[in-house]
Image: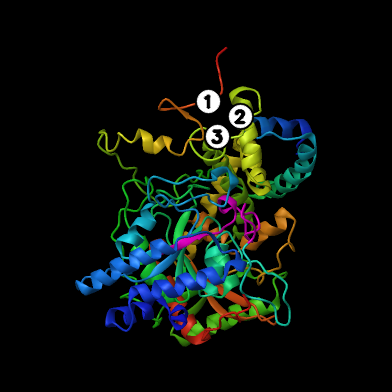
Amino acid sequence: VSALTSKTIADLRKGFRLGEYSAVEIALGFNEAVSAARILNAFTVETPEDALSCAQAADNARAAGEPGSLAGIPLGIKDLFATRGVDTTAGSRILTGFRPPYESTVTANLRKSGAGMLGKLNMDEFAMGSSNETSAYGPVISPWRRKGSNVGLTPGGSSGGSAAAVAAEIVPGATGTDTGGSIRQPAAFAGICGIKPTYGRCSRWGVVAFASSLDQAGPMAKTVLDCAILLEAMAGFDPKDATSLNLPVPQWEANLSSDLKGKRVGIPKEYRIDSVPTEINALWDRGMEWLMDAGAVPVDISLPHTKYALPTYYIIAPAEASSNLARFDGVRYGLRVGGGVGLDGMYSATRAEGFGAEVKRRIMIGTYVLSAGFYDAYFTKAQKVRALIKQDFRKAFEHCDVILTPTAPSAAFGIGETTDPLAMYLNDVFAVPASLAGLPAMSVPGGLDEQGLPLGLHLIGNEFDEQTVLNAALAIEERAGFTLRPEKWW
Amino acid sequence: MSVSNDQVRHIAKLARIAMSDGEIERLGPELNNILGWVEQLGEVNTDGVEPLTAVIDQKLRLRDDVVTEGDIRDEILANAPEPQHGFFAVPKVIE
């Protein structure tokens, strides 16, 4: 049974449909892998019974001749997605014990396709973090280790539980969410694939809100093909989300092709940063060679406002977070702490105890930049710079079809190694601009650094053009030949 | 521009987060560090630039003004820390 857990979703699906094994066998294999990997702290809740009952249903559907596109596939679900009757805490103490009476649209779509759930995956609190260290459940430990070292590394964040679980092969695929790199940076750290689609492709309904103008769900899996399969099941118009795209879901899987003949790949000069390790810039060059080998041509482009993307993000995201997180007031759900004076005292005591340090820091920044007298100087200014960043991309896509950059400025770092909040924010320097512009973007593994840790390559596409992103990622995947998995120590 | 401890205390009050003097003193320099860093946006000429409010151009949809779900009071109250008599209960507000 254990061999099943090392298969891709595409292969599992094929074998299941051919009757080589049952969905129940698949679920049992992953349930066992999940419980054997608790030391990674990747899960906040395990739901083996859910995986099994969905597997039973998948076996029945196969017998009846109508299995869904994900029948027989059990997935890990980031704890940001509301799951009916199953604890949904966004990695925060303030949502302790919250069991939604409803299911998020994305997970409902996955269920409709026949997928089951192995459990809820650990994450940075309210998706605010790049290392998974802000989780109320403690950090996820990456299955990867530096050569000759047993120092615990972060899997990145905020979708760190998702990345670690896929890399450790205790789930075949997982949901993630990406506000400013939270799918792509952990995917790069863990040597897996992850795509954030165009803003609005995946419904935000039932996804705990962090920064609503940026939040997007997306899949994380071992291969580009698996990401295409999952994204197709997750995406789709949802009247319950006011910013949901009212467009048909493209057939990303059927149209997947690594033939890039005539495609122009933009190389933005502003992403060449001196402080980035040379092996990351060298991998970037190799990535371009792989794309050229697939028929693409390189184009030098300029995204002049790139250096302002992170400071823009760190005004807009905390501002939106401070309003979104106002709902956690100890009245309707989650934690309530008495003891303060009156209603305000209860609010303040509840929020003081319920939120962790990073969440408080961001709420404070957001409250400040939205407060009377500062709103225009910070928030309106940031929205104007965001418009310029969007315009940079619009102009660049007149000259290219997809953009190639590194995913992150470093490989995975050790737990506790980065303590300065600003230094932590810099992790998303390459990921944030595409988020601010609402563009589809993906990380695909490119190779290992000299410490033996995975490095990712990052593809940014034009609005609605996930297909070119996936196709370019596939071309890299085929040429990089990255199939390494961390050596099992857990 | 630098934020004083009194301002940090005021922001914490606006955000409804109880903070000790020690926390205020620790947070002050952190906020100043971050705010000092974001102030580099001042270098960008944004004259005549419209603030971006929708990242993907879309028309806001209207839906029919009808009740689509309801009669789920108990489901909604099931997660409340202190429901009472079918309501959300809060500490006394009016003396």
Q: Name the residue under label 1.
A: B90
Is B10 displayed left or right of A119 in the figure?
right
Residue reaching furthest top? Answer: B95
User: Which of the two discs, 3 and 2, labels the residue nearer the N terminus?
Assistant: 3
Q: Mark 2 points at which residue?
A: A346
Is A331 displayed left or right of A355 in the figure?
left
Q: In this view, does B81 lie above or below A110?
A: above
The answer as to whether the residues below labels 3 and 2 share one chain is yes
- Highlighted magenta segment, given as a residue range: A117-139
Q: In the rendered structure, the residue with mark 1 lies on which chain?
A: B
Q: Pointer 2 and pointer 1: residues touching (CB < 8 Å)?
A: yes
Q: Residue at x 42, y 35 (%)?
A: B77
Q: Which of the pair A266/A252 is nearer the observer?
A: A252
Its colouring scheme is rainbow
Q: Indicate the position of residue A192 as horizontal and vertical percent values.
A: 52, 74
Q: Pointer 3 and pointer 1: residues touching (CB < 8 Å)?
A: no
Q: Which element is circle 3 on?
A: loop
* Residue A329: numbered disc: 3
